[in-house]
Image: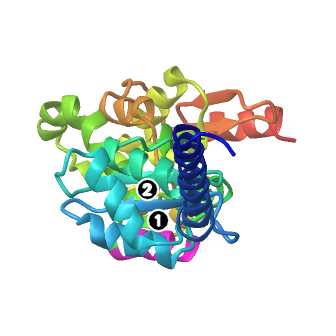
Amino acid sequence: MPPVSEQKSCARWCAKEIIAFLCVFVFVLFYAFFWSVPAGFPSGSVYEVKPGETYTKTAHGLADMGAIRSPYWFKTFVYIFSLANRKTLAGDYALAKPENVLVLAWRFSHGDFDIAPVRVTIPEGSSAAEESAILAKALKDFKSDDFLAGIKSGNLEGYLFPDTYLFLPNATASDTIGLMRQTFDEKTAPLEGAIATSGHPLADIVAMASVLEGEARTDSDMKLIAGILWKRLSIGMPLQVDSAPETYQKRGLPAPIGNPGLSAITDALYPTPSKYLYFISDKQGNIHYAKTLNEQNTNVAKYLK
């Protein structure tokens, strides 16, 4: 029979082993039932934390979408990781791949959004419908009907600036409209003084610029055509441009037929004076100018027949 001291030592060793086993067993149970990644983790989604949102609301939001198993443990870990400030940082958080509650609590308490913006290029002169089609292909939460309805209700055709944008993957129609309209204001701000003294309201400048992009490809041609079209308006002559067919029957500028870039807006604002009153574009896109209707008819016969 071993000495009493050895028996006590063995008992202590066995107790430590049992405690260690129980600790591991409890950890495994907690991990499996509360901390592990749920089977239905919403990979590829984005969770938005609104400004002032409590960590309790965030916890229940993540639980409702299947990203965590237990709101309680998410709150507990956020409380620990954020030094007891009891909040998550506002912003859009990418749930790109399955992550357990500890990782998510760390990210949400430290503002680790892990979200890559989507690069979208809107060509100059694009119509609202064309912009909508481009955005719908790039953004998963974008709804074309909402976009087009928002543009119609706000009379925003012509004011959604064509540019290369970085949108969040969950950007909505309202988000895109807001940013593109804001960009228009920022890009045209340096021209405000010139527009105010031009004799033309901004709406007419934008409408003219949209027509110019439909009629010509180069700045020099746009400036010349702008001079011609402003002259036609001043003498009461219909614009008669192919990009806006209604201008053959109706006098005056049409509503914007697209969203012009800064070059076209500037060309509309600073037209090139000339003696021309007519122009045509040949099959290669080259512009030919004429001072009289007879010269115009000669150009038509020469370049379009």
User: Quadrant location of the C terminus?
Assistant: top right
Extreme-top residue of the structure: 220
Could you say which disc has been placed on residue 176 in the image?
Answer: 2
Residue in the image at 53% along x and 74% along y: 65
Residue type at mark 1? Answer: Ala
Could you classify mark 2 by the number of other residues whose Cα lies within 10 Å: few (under 14), some (14-19), or many (20 or more)?
A: many
Residue in the image at 24% along x and 49% along y: 202
Residue type at mark 2? Answer: Thr
Residue in the image at 36% along x and 25% along y: 273
Q: Tell me which corner region of the image, top left, top right, bottom left or bottom right, holds residue 87.
A: bottom left
- Residue 113 location, x and y as percent? 44, 44
Kind of element beneath mark 2: helix
Q: With respect to residue 85, does 52 lie above or below?
A: below
Let me know if residue 253 is in the magenta part.
Answer: no
Q: How many marks?
A: 2
| 294 left or right, relative to 240 | right
Q: How is the image coloured?
A: rainbow
The residue wearing badge 1 is 173
- Whole-angstrom CA distance, mark 2 to mark 1, is 5 Å
Residue in the image at 69% along x and 46% along y: 1
Residue 183 visible in the current orientation: yes
Judged by its main secondary structure, the magenta piece is: helix
Disc 2 to disc 1: CB gap under 8 Å: yes
Q: Which residues are magenta?
A: 144-153
- Residue 262 location, x and y as percent? 39, 33
